Image (spheres, rainbow, N blue to C red):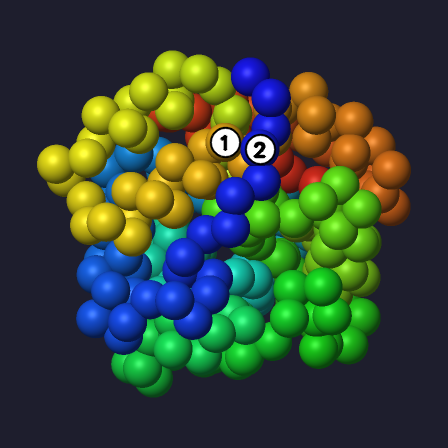
Amino acid sequence: MKRVVTPELLDSDAATPAEVQQTLADLRRINRWFGGISTTRRMLEQVVARIRQRSSQRGEITLLDVGAGSGDVSLTAARQIRPPAQIRVTLMDRMPAHLPRNGTGTIAGDALALPFLDNSFDLVTCSLLIHHLEREQIVHFVNQALRVARVAVLLNDLRREPLHLALMCAGYPLFARLTLHDGIASVRRAYTPQELKSILGNTDAAGVEMENRYLYRMGIIVWKDVR
């Protein structure tokens, strides 16, 4: 199945504010039901365990979520991990209207020009961001994220497979028009695990761990230091 790039409406000004909010609500349901939150939670549990194993650190762990939207994936995953850990989440998105207005730490910014000093956070994560980027942009983003992170970068994204596309099309009755359009576009635009493994080989990563997860998700831990 060839990768095809189709613009997603949520990334443009073509949608009304009501359509944007409906689509964000749909995405929260998709993340809750179809592996978005569980993929990030699993990666967080692995990385937090490694942090605990490497050092005596038992205090707060800081996490930057890039392209966060409403932040449901990282905020929920951080609350659900076992054993529990204190994780302070900062949400960043290039479109301020997508960010929550509930007092959570938020910042508007570009994923390809992260406005943070080196080693500003323990972890950097993103969900459903990588498929929006071309190969050179992925390398640039991951290197930027590794610069900002002290420990690792967590990538949560879709796998491009024909059956995944068929399942997305079958979801027509469940979702709003904008959600269905962007969902189909996302699957067609996504990468395969083999493609991403090759791309990440060109980054500054000290190590990469990749795992296929529920309903055509993949979780990728990009380590800054494998000691």
Quadrant assignment for the N terminus = top right
Is residue 43 or residue 73 the one in the foreground? 73
Instruction: State the image quarter where residue 102 is shown.
Output: bottom left
Q: Are marks 2 and 1 in contact (CB under 8 Å)?
A: yes
What residue is drawn where x is 27% and y is 74%? 17
Which residue shows up at 14% across the image and 39% down it? 174
| Above or below, 93 relative to 67 | below
Q: Which residue is mark 1?
A: 188
Mark 2 residue type: Val
Q: Find numbered disc 2 in the image and state the secondary structure of the residue it sits on.
A: loop
Residue 92 percent location from the top left of the image: 53, 71
Which quadrant of the structure image shows residue 59?
bottom right
| Alpha-carbon span between mark 2 and mark 1 | 5 Å
Ranked by sequence position, the earlier of labels 2 and 1 is 2
In front of the other: 200 or 185: 185
Q: Where in the figure is residue 142, as x and y percent of width and height?
A: 74, 51
> Pointer 2: what residue?
4
Task: Tell me residue 3's x, y (percent).
Answer: 60, 28
